[in-house]
Image: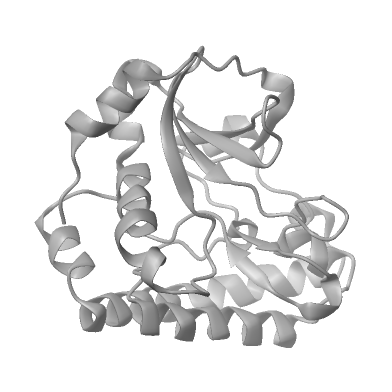
Amino acid sequence: MYISFREISKQISNSKEVILRDANILSYGSNRICYLDETNPSKLIKIARHPENWKKDHRQSFSEWYVSKSIAPVNTDCRISLCQSWVRTNKGPGLVVDRIVDDHGQSITLRKLLFKRELTVNRALFLIENIIYNFSIAGIPASDFNIDNFVIEGEHANNKLVMIDGFSPKKINLKTNIILQSKVLSSCYTKRKWRQTKPRFTYCAQKVYAGDYCFAAAVPLSDASSGTSGIKK
């Protein structure tokens, strides 16, 4: 894997500053916060939770950037939200990604689909495992099967889910380099991560589908800072 931090820094320096408002926060994790870009509603911007240490918080952004630019372009149906560019924002350096929406222009997560009973748990598991098969063919090493990392695209009746986050390793190291260079290793990595996550994912999906309000929404931003995932134990 080759990630040019010089190229990324150049893109950030040469970009016009984008002003982000906290009212436009759409989602968040332990390291990154995702904002709607008011100037271009078809895009989202992922920024580091700690801008003063942005390279550390953006480690997964760097591998997502690589997947988008080096693996996804040769696969016509890779089921990820593609990364487009790096920009300068009032919240620090940000990664611009495609916003995935339904036929009404809304970003509806798998959690919401289950809570509204538009999908059964078994159907959701079937769709996720189809994505895993897709990833194994494309060589995409997904690492985080959080229930909020999947959004429906287009008409709901088509049941097309797209992974918007977690479709790459969380760290940049030698192991990641090796995995990203091999479709076989990427496939094994994705399948292993899913096997590890599937019991918790299924438990969470069952709770959401049953209408348990403790599982009806993603964790609050204050809890996310402690590393809690959207899949509650």
Q: Name the residue nearer the viewer: 154 or 31.
A: 154
26 sits left or right of 92 in the view: right
Rendered residue at 40%/64% (across/down): 73
191 sits left or right of 198 in the view: left
Kindly indicate the quadrant of the structure image that contains residue 102: bottom right
Give the image location of residue 207, x and y in percent: 76, 69
Q: Name the residue nearer the viewer: 18 or 62.
A: 18
Instruction: Confirm whether residue 167 shows in the render.
Output: yes
Residue farthest to the left? 174
Rendered residue at 52%/44% (across/down): 97
Q: Name the residue nearer the viewer: 118 or 65.
A: 65
Give the image location of residue 218, x and y in percent: 68, 48
Instruction: Confirm whether residue 142 shows in the render.
Output: no
Is residue 115 placed above or below 191 in the rendered structure? above
Is residue 7 placed above or below 232 in the rendered structure? above
Rendered residue at 65%/44% (across/down): 219
Q: Quarter of the image for the N terminus: give it.
A: bottom left
Kindly indicate the quadrant of the structure image that contains residue 81: bottom right
Q: Quarter of the image for the C terminus: give it.
A: bottom right
Give the image location of residue 18, x and y in percent: 55, 17
What is the count of numbered marks? 0
Is residue 195 placed above or below 60 in the rendered structure? below
205 sits left or right of 130 in the view: right
Kindly indicate the quadrant of the structure image that contains residue 177: bottom left
Give the image location of residue 49, x and y in percent: 46, 26
Rendered residue at 72%/64% (across/down): 153
